[in-house]
Image: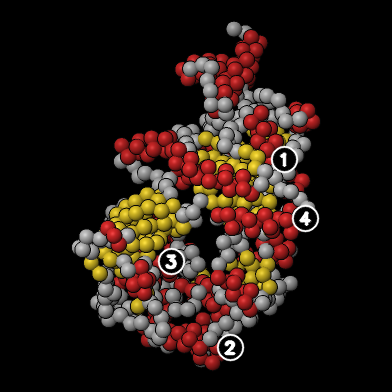
Amino acid sequence: MTKAEAQIRITKLREVIDHHRYLYLVLDKSEISDAAHDSLKHELAQLEQEYPDLITPDSPTQRVGGKALEKFQKISHKTPMLSIEDVFGKEEVDSWEEYLSRLEKDVSFQYFGEVKIDGLAVSLRYKNGILNLAATRGNGVIGEDVTQNIKTIESIPLNLTIHNKMPTPGIQKKAEELLKSGGIEIRGEVYMELKDFERFNKERKKKGESEYANPRNLAAGSIRQLNSKLTALRPLRFIAYGIATDIGQETHAQEHDIMKALGFKTDNTAKVLHNIPSVLSYWEDIKKKRDTLLFQIDGVVISVNENNVFERLGVAGKGYRGMRALKFSGKQTTTKILDIRLQVGRTGAVTPVASLAPVQVGGVTISHATLHNAQEIARLGVKIGDTVIVERAGDVIPRVVEVVKDLRTGKEKTFHMPLNCPVCGVKLVRPGKEKIWRCPNKECRAKKKEFLRNFVSRKAFDIEGLGPKILERLMEENLVSLPSDIFELSEGDLTPLERFAETSSANLIESIAQAKKISLEAFIYSLGIRHVGEETAQELAFYFGSLKALKKASKEELKAVEDIGDITAEKIFSWFNSKTNIELVKRLLLSGVKIINPKKRPVGALQGKTFVLTGSLDSLSRDEAKERIKSKGGKTAESVSLNTDYVVSGKDSGSKLERAKELGVRVLTEKEFIKLLR
């Protein structure tokens, strides 16, 4: 075969292979067997191997990427990939439509419904019809370039072809133009079907490898593999839900028709819904079918169907006003309480935790649930051996909802909160009106362990590689008892320990050495002083300017610091006047810790303004938001008071938002907050 003949054959093979990919993965039907399809791909690979200069990026043979990446590159989304606000049930859906009607008067809203697959959102950019870039959602504004990995997913076309007629002649013409010269951006969800997930986990179990908790985690982890050849081994799929390019579409329903015509799998349950009763009917119908679907979902997405109305409604901080995720109520199941154990925290707080017979709730296996305190146990009437109803509220947080008392056998045991610490045996105390019992013993091993975990955490000394398991092992070997012991470790101390090779020992010692330089605020936070969190540590650092000045501060001087009251001032004063703690700080400094004192507080447009953040933001992490506020001269606090200037309300805002309303503190949406930072 000549090269010219090979080129003709290659072109034809690619067209036929793509046609059958579309039939199988989009239309769920086949005209040829899998073996025949594989044979066509094999012939194509052979020809491309003979004529490598004829290989193009969109060839079906290019789905498995090349060498592994060192890291993912950051990608800015041209238009943000915003989150969707959740609603639960008829009342909240009705309230949403009332809200829309106030914004868009005299409009009869039409909606579009589709399932909300529990996967990983990605954006696909095509240039002249060829897949050019794929990025994860990230924080909604910045994602990661995962193009190599996305190419391994068979249900994602590497080049776009119009397989059938578009909704209108105008859309058809515009699409044809963009495929020849232009760009099209498709958004959707990478997921794994349940049968594939179960098969994958069985194979891992056979090999003695740990199993994945749910399909979503496996899909997300697969897309974030630096080696795309490993991603190719995972049975991933893609379903498209939106177009971020103007192709002339007037409704969201048309977007689904366009995506299907371009070769993408779309939701076959999706439909136009003419009013709220039909929205609720669709939701109920999907809820009934939920357990029969091939993939995991956690609700349905309802959008205003007309795009011009949707765009006029705009964005309200968290997401689009014209879109809501109508979620299913928390999944519930029953299990048994095998035991109630106690955990001791770094401040000595003793928390009862229920050990459960392992059970799957919403795709996640849970075996523990916090019972908070003795009063909560009494309220629920929980006994050891009880059958209880466990719920993952909002499909996320597991909790004990109720005791099934009718299933009691009489052998259940009443739990009594012990009088003594379960670790060191010292008598517990319950200060003032607190509900929490605490261990007062400074030498309690459990308190020490939690104290050291806090000491090396990201907001404190941030020692990379020194996680909880390694820390516990060092304590077991009596290599670490006090914080200063960490800075006196050598490679020779670590190498003899199991699982510590010379390289890992050297890396950890290097991390410890680098951590010796620390800001004053992080140092104060690392000490684990009760009531002194990140914000208070920052205020103390700026106010006193040095550790020496802070150690000498009187209670009155401490109370002069903003947001520090009598109780916190007493705790700080007592801490720095304890002989044990004076020695602890002295040993840290002698072991080579260098504290970097803060410069003057930044001066900027937010000078003197105090912010409280509640809920999660789409465009910034909480730490990033705090840094931006500080860089403009502002301050952040953890609780809302009359001294608070602004409360920034993100997704799932809690009691701080209600407190702000009570006190008349100004509440900012995410959009308003970002504008203030500019």
Q: Tell me the CA gap for discs 4 and 2.
A: 53 Å
In screen coordinates, is 193 left or right of 428?
right
Does label 3 or label 2 sit earlier along the sequence? 3
Q: Nearer the viewer, residue 76 or 304?
A: 304
Q: Amino acid at mark 3?
A: Val
Q: Tell me the CA gap for discs 2 and 1.
A: 59 Å
Q: Nearer the viewer, residue 143 or 268?
A: 268
Does label 1 or label 4 sit earlier along the sequence? 4
- Within 10 Å of disc 3 (Cα), the crowding (few <14, some 14-19, many 20+) is many
Q: Amino acid at mark 1?
A: Thr
Disc 2 secondary structure class: loop
Task: Give the label on residue 560, or none.
Answer: 2
Query: Circle 4 sits on which residue?
Result: 105
Disc 3 secondary structure class: loop
Quadrant including the N terminus: top right
Q: Do callouts 2 and 1 mark residues in contact (Cβ within 8 Å)? A: no
